Amino acid sequence: MKKIAILASGEGTNAERIIRYFSGHATVEVAVVIASRPTARVVERAHILNVPCEIIIPQDFAAGKGLEVLKSFKVDFVVLAGFLSRIPEDILHDYAHKIVNIHPSLLPKFGGKGMYGMHVHEAVLASGEHESGITIQYINEHYDQGDIIFQAKCPVLSDDTVETLAQRVHALEYTYYPQVIERLLSFPS
């Protein structure tokens, strides 16, 4: 059984979809959710879905508590789902090519520090782009510069608002992120 950890900082909609997708799975289980804030909605979602949840504030995460928790739950693979803290070197080293992230644009466009959530959709609309989408990638020590694993596109419509574009991008995330995680765990690189 492959054990995954989901790291999240906010609402946890992607985390919930991933947990539900792997519920009862023959070879993959969500072993733990790690939240960076006690008030993050992902904490409530994890509890409702009976998945252990650890709250690790960013300072403690950076000081080694994150790796300690991953090891204690015997985690094989780490999934970032709206996790806003930087991943420290010890985790990057121990989980090299075993940490994935999803980004709400077609990287390398609209990536980097500060480019997350609605900020990305605002930038896409302001640029006049005709398409957006998602990028699933391995992470490294640089924001949004890891090897790209998968991308899916959606149109940017002339009457789009940040909210309507975000809805289409979220639909891609909910559909593809669990499937790509499953594929990676079935056929590791």
Image: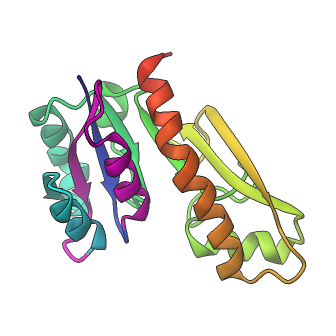
User: Which residue appears at 40% of the width and 25% of the height?
Assistant: 96
Q: Quadrant of residue 130?
A: bottom right
- The answer to which of 138 and 176 lies nearer the viewer is 176
* Extreme residue toward the left, this view: 72
Q: Position of residue 158 (x, y in %)?
A: 90, 78
- The answer to which of 91 and 169 lies nearer the viewer is 169
User: Which residue appears at 61% of the width and 41% of the height?
Assistant: 145
User: Which residue appears at 28% of the width and 26% of the height?
Assistant: 26
- Give left or right: position of 141 versus 38: right
User: Which residue appears at 76% of the width and 51% of the height?
Assistant: 153
- Give left or right: position of 53 versus 25: left
| Residue 21 drawn in magenta | yes
Q: Is residue 75 above or below residue 163?
A: above
**Which residues lie in the magenta part?**
12-39
Q: Quadrant of residue 47?
A: bottom left
Q: Position of residue 168 (x, y in %)?
A: 68, 66
| Residue 20 drawn in magenta | yes
Q: Position of residue 88 (x, y in %)?
A: 33, 43
